Amino acid sequence: MKKLCVVFRHGPHGTAHGREALDLAMLAASFELEVSLLFCDEGVLHLLQGQEPEKIGCRDYIATFKALPFYDVEIQLVCKQSLADYGLSKAALEEELQILDAAAITAHLKSVDEVVVY
């Protein structure tokens, strides 16, 4: 089975990057690719609890992350340094995630066949 890692590097609102990354992850998983998600840089903001994007006129695609287990997308990784850069702790995050340091992220990216960065 081919492995794909989708990297979320941009914030959740203001651009289509996050929605497109999520769509790609679900589409790839539906074609039976082993998909993992990596949240780093500004992309860690996708994981914050209590977002209300409707208040700023954006669609709430963040709730769709809860559907990922139905697509067998169960590997969700977060950059430890990015969390620190944004002053976030694991308790502030929406999901059960694996928090990785730079060396572990590098090892994961080397273990997959394709990496797509949004």
Image: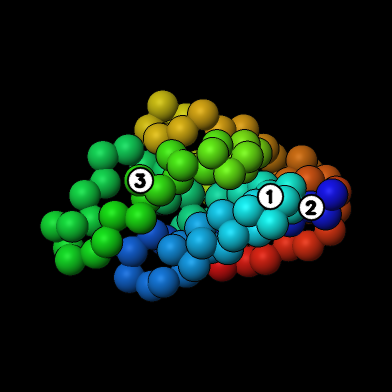
Figure quadrant of residue 4:
bottom right
Is 18 on the left-hand or right-hand side of 58? right
Q: Earlier in the sequence, mark 3 or mark 2?
A: 2
> Which mark is drawn over residue 3?
2
Q: Is residue 42 visible?
A: yes
Residue 66: image location, x then y, percent = 43, 39
> Which mark is drawn over residue 50?
none
Residue for point 56% across, 54% down: 26
CA distance for labels 1 and 3: 18 Å
Report which residue position mark 3 lands on.
63
Q: Is residue 6 visible?
A: no
CA distance for labels 3 and 2: 24 Å
Task: Between residue 39 and residue 23, name the one nearer to us.
Answer: 23
Residue for point 21% across, 49% down: 52
Q: Earlier in the sequence, mark 1 or mark 2?
A: 2
Q: How would you rate the neighbour count of disc 2 (Cα within 10 Å): few for under 14, some for 14-19, many for 20 or more?
A: some
Mark 1 lies on a secondary structure that is strand
- State if disc 2 and disc 1 touch (CB < 8 Å): yes
What's under tag 3, amino acid-wise?
A: Ala
Is 18 on the left-hand or right-hand side of 1? left
Residue 36: image location, x then y, percent = 67, 47
Outermost residue, bottom direction?
15
Q: How would you rate the neighbour count of disc 3 (Cα within 10 Å): few for under 14, some for 14-19, many for 20 or more?
A: few
Outermost residue, front direction?
31
What's under tag 1, amino acid-wise?
A: Val
Report which residue position mark 1 lands on.
35
Residue 116: image location, x then y, percent = 67, 66
Q: Earlier in the sequence, mark 1 or mark 3?
A: 1
What's under tag 2, amino acid-wise?
A: Lys
CA distance for labels 1 and 2: 6 Å
Report the quarter where the C terminus lies: bottom right
